[in-house]
Amino acid sequence: MRYLYCLLGLIFLAVIGLFSCEKDAVRPNILFILADDWSYPYASIYGDKSIRTPNLDRLAANGTVFTNAYCASPSCTPSRAAMLTGRYPHNLGEGVNLCGRLEHRIPTYVQLLEKEGYAVAFDRKGWAPGDFHKMGYTENPAGKPAVFAPFIDSIPKGQPFFFWFGTNDPHRPFDLNNGKKAGIDPQKINLPAFLPDVPEIRGDVADYLSEVERFDREIGDLLRKLESSGQLENTIIVVASDNGMPFPHAKANLYDYGTHVPLLISRFSKSGSLPKRNDSFVNLIDLTPTFLDWAGVKQRPEMDGISLLPVLNGEKTVHRPAVFLERERHCLCRAEFEYGAGYPMRAIRTKGYLYIRNFRPDRMPAGDETIPGTPSVFGDVDGGPTKVYMMDHRNDAAVKPLFSLGFGKRPADELYILKDDPYTIRNQATNSAYADIKKDLQKRLDQWMNEENDPRRNGGGDQIDKYESTTHAWITRTGIIFLDE
């Protein structure tokens, strides 16, 4: 009998070990591919025929394409910090600003996944721009720096990985005329109505799109490495962007071309397919709890994000009924607060409407045109051919109203009726026909800000303008001048 008990005990331990191994084996790898300044709808998966993105098409055939994904803030550092933590930027202290400080005490999914045994690393642009050494980090908050192929080869068999591939595409500067060289016809581009329809700007957008195509080619390289290493079927692939395109009325603004970004989640597993398309609202802060769910992390800190797992599992189709968006300081481009004055905004985006509140409408949304003693020129608009053209032709009849949209002052309230105005160029906030809609959206935004203890509620938040940047730069007409290099 004693031998029987021993035998049963050994069998029990073997079974426990088997289940433990199986549990480890089924934990998926996660490859997070993050573009830089890529706006919806610039990809063939969204119906844009002017560019070729076959690798995104392949991922879409094996995954879910989200049509209403939004970044939490249309500015690199706070957007990336929000994705790392699952928190709204205003809950990140000094991390709310571009080049701000993401405090080490605020948990990131990188820290949580490493505790769960994941190998975590990133390549190229992780949490950025900013100096992470000034905030208690010894390495980038996105993980250890690594190149994808050797990183995959170095991981012990059975250990899951999380890899952040942060391309710099399609961020400025672009290679001039690269769009034409790549075979993109500028005349076939669906040019946003907030940009002047002239050859110089069509060419600039074509150059931008050529970088989206290059981004797609690099996705193909990543997929080939997953296939050759035998990791493709057990890897969930997430493709997104930190914010929208680097053009006036887009990046650093709460209009759709600043916040509305692509999102694609793909898996080649034979065990089951994902829904092909979802039109519900997603905030990219929702990625963090989703990553943690995939990894089976039970103990987790407070988050504002909502896991996408119920949508991906087909349990529900509606994720969020609306998204709340925000922006504080982007670049150093206003003289007040020793160049620290930002342009604080909050917004609610629903299916039919976009309501924006500008908390300091006395300031210039695009930054001051000049700041004495500095090379800054409308510093919240990236320098390049489009900026140069619009500045030089600001008094032309066709350009003047568009220049005002991208560079001029704005009222405290903005309301856009999206079915009639998809490019958000006709503010209806003073139109009495929409008074009830505006009142409802204002109420919902106020309620969210109060529930969130947003520093900007009730007219506050000036301390945000006093937060120091960890790095410094000036945006000019044509580019950027780094002060810390």
Image (cartoon, rainbow, N blue to C red):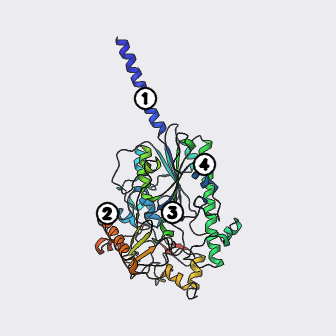
Q: Nearer the viewer, mark 3 or mark 1?
A: 3
Q: Which mark is residue 261?
A: 3
Q: Is residue 92 above or below residue 220?
A: below
Q: Amino acid at mark 2?
A: Glu
Task: Provide residue 481's location: percent of width, then percent of height.
Answer: 53, 73
Q: CA distance from mark 2 to mark 1?
A: 44 Å
Give whichever of discs 3 and 2 has the lower sequence position: 3
- Mark 2 / mark 1, whichever is N-terminal: 1
Mark 4 packing: few (<14 Cα in 10 Å), some, or many (20+)? Answer: some
Place residue 437 in its image quadrant: bottom left
**Residue 185: % across, % down:** 69, 69
Q: Look at the numbered discs 3 and 1 and tell me whether their residues touch, using CB distance below 8 Å.
A: no
Res 376 seen here: no
Residue type highlighted by circle 1: Gly
Specify few, some or many for label 2: CA neighbours under 10 Å numbering under 14, 14-19, or 20 or more: some
Q: Secondary structure at mark 1?
A: helix
Residue type at the position of mark 3:
Val
The answer to whether residue 36 is visible is yes
Q: Are marks 3 and 4 in contact (CB under 8 Å)?
A: no
Q: Which residue bears the numbered disc 4?
A: 223
Name the amino acid type tagged 4.
Leu
Mark 2, secondary structure of its residue: loop
Task: Say which residue label 2 marks.
Answer: 452
Q: Position of residue 465 (x, y in %)?
A: 36, 73
Q: Earlier in the sequence, mark 3 or mark 1?
A: 1
Residue matched to label 1: 17
Examine the image and state in which quarter residue 297 appears: top left
Q: Residue at x 45, y 65 (%)?
A: 351
Instruction: Check the image and name the residue furthest to the front.
Output: 433
Q: Residue 420, position in %: x, y?
A: 50, 74
Position above or below: 445 against 225: below
